[in-house]
Image (cartoon, grey):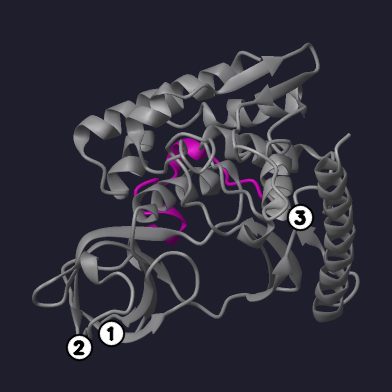
Amino acid sequence: MTFRTSRSLLLLTALTAVSAVVSAQQKDTVAAKAGPGLPDRIWQDPGAMASLDMFHGSDGKARAPDPTEAFTFVSEDPAGSNPKLEVVAEDGVVWKVKLGPESQSETAATRFLWAAGYFVETGHYIAALKVLGLPVLRRGQEFVSPGGIVRGARLERKTASGEKIGNWDWFDNPFLGRRELNGLRVMMALLNNWDLKQINNTIYLVDGGRYYTVSDLGATFGSTGNAMTRSKGMPVEYQDSKFIAKDTPDFVDFVLHSRPFFLGAVGVTHYRDRTRMEQITRHIPRADARWIGQRLSTLTDSQIRDVFRSAGYGSGDVEILTRTIRLRIAALEAL
């Protein structure tokens, strides 16, 4: 073993230990804020899935934004990797607006998670949003046309229904070994979500309970892979990607590529985290994968098309995505 390799391994071990300490501190913080004895929830029965409004999602038509009305600029949000701002509708409802390549993919992904029984914040895609009083944006100005027209906007209702109290770890949470968590792991593979960082998993305190969510689903419906090959919101690449890597009589491994090219001392933490992500969709009990597939199989083709229509995909892409989702659901049913 070379000196450089030994040094890298030592650094990786030290960073893993630090990560464990930080994770424990985060868990203590969550417990302190939420209080003892509160129920932890990650899934609920959505009822008859064939009757769900997949176009409008959990908000329903009555709570969806009206794309024909004008909104008024409130503020620009500098957080995160995508341009974001807040606007207020004519009825006084404040909406969080996300711009960029994740707007369509995240709109669609949240609807499938909601239909499967997982907790999400439903977003609504508007191809051209009129915003009054819009200044020159620090980020995302390339999505603005003259007259305050914002193109490709994903709107999410800003509510006070829940308090964010922390993040949760795929490998350390109250649901390990349970069918509901395993079903969520399958959903990440179904959607080709390659960005499974812990920071994208949020715990909300709602109605006296802790609700566990995947709160960022933009890196979906493309190809998984390293920084050079992965994509989001690319229907043909999603269609061409492999879904199941390996199945045995008891377990299934789903495809998720996330590891960078090589391990370097500068990027040890990034390499470790990306490598670990690939384990999230592996060694899933066959029965649990089949369970979520059987539930999804009750969605009609019309409902699946509605998901992608709601996200602003063109008719050709809607058919590609619908066919691919249907094939993946059938593969889960056949396990």
* Residue at (40, 45) in percent of width and height: 54
Mark 2–mark 1 CB contact (< 8 Å):
yes
- Using the image, determine if residue 24 lies above or below residue 45: below
Mark 3–mark 2 CB contact (< 8 Å):
no
Asked if residue 124 lies left or right of residue 27, the reply is left
Asked if residue 300 lies left or right of residue 188, the reply is left
Give how far across and how far down residue 15 sits, in percent.
Answer: 83, 58
If you read the primary sequence from the N terminus, does the residue marked by circle 2 or circle 1 appear first?
Answer: 1
Tell me the SS state at disc 3: loop
Q: What's the residue type where badge 1 is placed? A: Phe
Badge 1 crowding class, 10 Å Cα cut-off, few under 14, some 14 to 19, many 20 or more, is many
Badge 3 crowding class, 10 Å Cα cut-off, few under 14, some 14 to 19, many 20 or more, is some
- Using the image, determine if residue 221 lies above or below residue 246: below
Q: What's the residue type where badge 3 is placed? A: Asp
Badge 2 crowding class, 10 Å Cα cut-off, few under 14, some 14 to 19, many 20 or more, is few
What residue is pinned by disc 2? 133
What residue is pinned by disc 3? 169
Range drawn in magenta: 44-60
**Which residue of the protein is positioned furthest toward the left in this rendering?**
146
Give how far across and how far down residue 216 sits, in percent.
Answer: 53, 57
319 or 75: which is nearer to us? 75
Tell me the SS state at disc 1: strand
140 or 226: which is nearer to us? 226
Q: Which mark is residue 73?
A: 1
Q: Quadrant of the C terminus?
A: top right
> Taking the image as drawn, is residue 301 in sight?
no
> Taking the image as drawn, is residue 47 in sight?
yes
* Residue at (41, 60) in percent of width and height: 123
Q: CA distance from mark 3 to mark 2?
A: 41 Å
Q: Which mark is residue 303?
A: none
Q: CA distance from mark 2 to mark 1?
A: 6 Å
If you read the primary sequence from the N terminus, does the residue marked by circle 3 or circle 1 appear first?
Answer: 1
